Amino acid sequence: MYPVPVAGSCEFLVTSGSTMAAVEVARQMSEGARNLSLSGHVGFDSMPDQLVNKSVCQGFCFNILCVGETGLGKSTLMDTLFNTRFEGDPAAHNQPGVHIKSNNYELQESNVRLKLSIVNSVGFGDQINKEESYKSIVEFIDAQFEAYLQEELKIKRTLHSYHDSRIHACLYFIAPTGHSLKSLDLVTMKKLDSKVNIIPIIAKADSISKNELQKFKIKIMSELVSNGVQIYQFPTDDETVAEINGTMNAHLPFAVVGSTEEIKIGNKMMKARQYPWGTVQVENENHCDFVKLREMLIRVNMEDLREQTHARHYELYRRCKLEEMGFKDTDPDNKPFSLQETYEAKRNEFLGELQKKEEEMRQMFVMRVKEKESELKEAEKELHDKFDRLKKLHQDEKKKLEDKKKSLDDEINAFKQRKTAAELLQSQAQQSGSQQTLKREKERKNNPWLCTE
Ligand code: GTP
Ligand code: MG
């Protein structure tokens, strides 16, 4: 049951239905809002001031990614852009791959504080095999989006104090070859264009002649278009900046020169690069596009770059990620699908899968048990057979031995009988012998004339 406000009034209806129904009613209600005129000052016209004050209080953050080959003047340009010297140890260029180095700074101009992150792709283009050069850059950008998404998905979010490390602008430094883009540049920009606002710049533009530079710019733009690389376009929908942004879009890629060296020109100190044949003034629009870049990147479009990062690039990452996780806004019939419904559908799907897995495991277990059982039965049968064989063998052996024993017993008995008979005969013989001796003895006594033999 939801209390639903009735369009154009303060009454509430108590109705039943899903969250989606309540959302739909709220939408209808906002469409049906009536225009009323005020009869006196209320004060909500101070909202823009309130917003400005709050923003100034909170401060701003801006994250720049510099991508470009070693020694193209990335660090020098950053120092020149922000009128400072961002100290940082020079990076080693003998690494096996590209690695990302991020430095955070706090800057203040008037009462506006800026948290600035300068991210460098160290070792970009240094490897012999450059196939994977873009990977660590893409991974870094995604990791920042992921961190923000994780914060957003928390039950207890602290987005107002969260240090947003998402990349707002990628300055892509192109070597001033005067020929065309290298395949490394095209591949890298193509991989990055859906993740970050790319602003291509021709580095060290003082090393290329005016005519060559014009041709080089045209060549670069046509190559970007033919390869479908989307670079950041300065927005022309806000009429206050539409004209300047429109003009500047036609100047892309900016050809820049960087220098922190100040040289006295006339009676003014100016950032310049001095050569035996003359001086290149960094902030002179006839010499290079540095001022145009600073104007577009910092002074006019910094907020749009932040907004585009959130509304376009982060939104795309978030959408893909949530879709990957199974969330969607509409069901298969294209009807709106609330987060709760998605969650329940996903939960049911998960439970179904779990049940299926459980059933599969159970069947597998039963099958295994049956297999084991039949294996055991087989082994038992084999053991029984073996036992029977051994038993029979034992019985045969026993019988043979008994037979042998019987025949031996018979032999012994026969021998005993023969022995007894022999003894009997012997004693009879002895007996008859002694009777004859006695008889002769008697005869001799009776007849002493009988001579003895
Ligand atoms: P790694 O961080 O080592 O990749 O170099 P990097 O791109 O940061 O270049 P860095 O700013 O260190 O400059 C390298 C050299 O180029 C230095 O000697 C700079 O003085 C010089 N340099 C920088 N900007 C320009 C430029 O606009 N024109 C010319 N001609 N030289 C420049
Ligand atoms: Mg550097």
Image: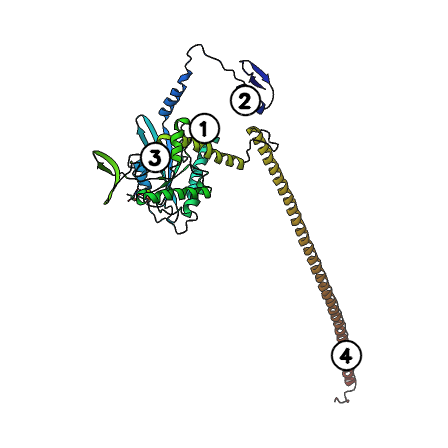
Mark 2 vs 3, N-terminal side:
2
* Secondary element type, mark 4: helix
Question: Whole-percent x and y of residue 228?
Answer: 47, 42
Residue identified by numbered label 3: 292
Residue 214, picture quadrant = top left
Whole-angstrom CA distance, mark 4 to mark 3, is 158 Å
Residue most toward the front? 211
Q: Are marks 2 and 3 in contact (CB under 8 Å)?
A: no
> Which mark is on residue 27?
2
Q: Are marks 4 and 3 in contact (CB under 8 Å)?
A: no
Whole-angstrom CA distance, mark 4 to mark 2, is 148 Å
Residue most toward the top? 39
Mark 4 vs 2, N-terminal side:
2
Neighbourhood count class around disc 3 (C-alpha, 10 Å): few under 14, some 14–19, many 20 upward: many
Indicate the amino acid at tag 4. Answer: Ala
> Which mark is on residue 429?
4
Residue most toward the left? 267
**Residue at horizontal 41 percent and vertical 30 percent from the top:** 304
Foreground tag (4 vs 2): 2
Indicate the amino acid at tag 1. Answer: Arg
